[in-house]
Image (tube, grey):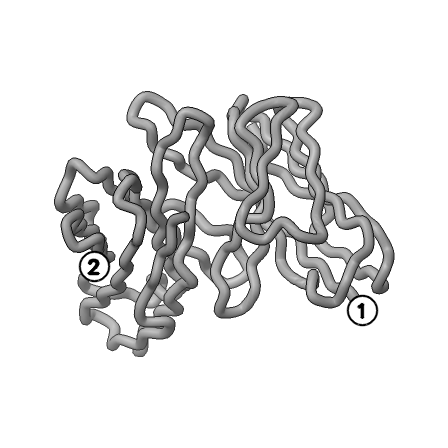
Amino acid sequence: NAGVTQTPKFRVLKTGQSMTLLCAQDMNHEYMYWYRQDPGMGLRLIHYSVGEGTTAKGEVPDGYNVSRLKKQNFLLGLESAAPSQTSVYFCASSYLGVEAKNIQYFGAGTRLSVL
Amino acid sequence: GENVEQHPSTLSVQEGDSAVIKCTYSDSASNYFPWYKQELGKRPQLIIDIRSNVGEKKDQRIAVTLNKTAKHFSLHITETQPEDSAVYFCAASAALGLGSQIIFGKGTRLHILP
């Protein structure tokens, strides 16, 4: 049981390049999330999904797209990377359960630098 | 939408003393308040949480209190130890039929001084 796995762990891009970050979870969770973490800004929600085939915008969605074609995978795409997207990206998954607690299980993060 | 304010942004306490981190939230529909700890270079992990129908919850040296009327909740760490040094995030969530977002505070960097 690996939990939440993110690939890659590190990536350097040039401005204008595209890339996809992959998040995979093996806990059969319904909900999945992508956050970015910047110094002094906490964790800001980019996009999230409440089930296979669904996606929704979070707090900072501009410049990103997502897809949830399979329940266990949630992909984050950058079509044309910009230096402002330099950040650490965390994926998380959760389920509400009986007590309706939205406990987030985080991946190890992807450190992205855009030059 | 929900807005979570967290204070202070940095906190230094002597080892063995207590630390208190405070958060406020804006959406009265929020009913779940977790706290996450993030050690340097690691992922955030849940350390304690509280539901809106409870005023206080304790787990060994950590406790969380909630004042639903004032929309305040706080994390209390007693008898602090070096391993408590980390960034702590509060969060608020409202359980919705279509799934719920968690809104995080900006974090508090806690330093435990020897």
Q: Which residue is mark 2?
A: B76
Left/right of residue B6 with respect to residue B71 in the rendered view: right
Occupied quadrant, residue A95? top left
Q: Residue at x 34, y 33 (%)?
A: A101
Mark 2 surroundings: few (<14), some (14-19) or many (≥20) residues within 10 A = some
- Say which amino acid is labelled 1: Leu
Question: Disc 1 is attached to a residue of which chain?
Answer: A
User: What kind of element bears circle 2?
Assistant: strand
Q: Residue at x 36, y 50 (%)?
A: B91
| Separation of residues labelled 1 and 2 (CA atoms) | 41 Å
Q: Residue at x 85, y 63 (%)?
A: A14
Left/right of residue B86 with respect to residue A9 in the rendered view: left
- Say which amino acid is labelled 2: His
Q: Position of residue A56 (x, y in %)?
A: 58, 36
**Which mark, by number, is residue A115?**
1
Q: Position of residue A37 (x, y in %)?
A: 56, 59
Q: Position of residue B15 (x, y in %)?
A: 25, 72
Mark 1 surroundings: few (<14), some (14-19) or many (≥20) residues within 10 A = some
Q: Residue at x 82, y 55 (%)?
A: A80
Nearest the viewer among A49 and B59 is A49
Occupied quadrant, residue B57? top left
Left/right of residue B9 with respect to residue A16 in the rendered view: left
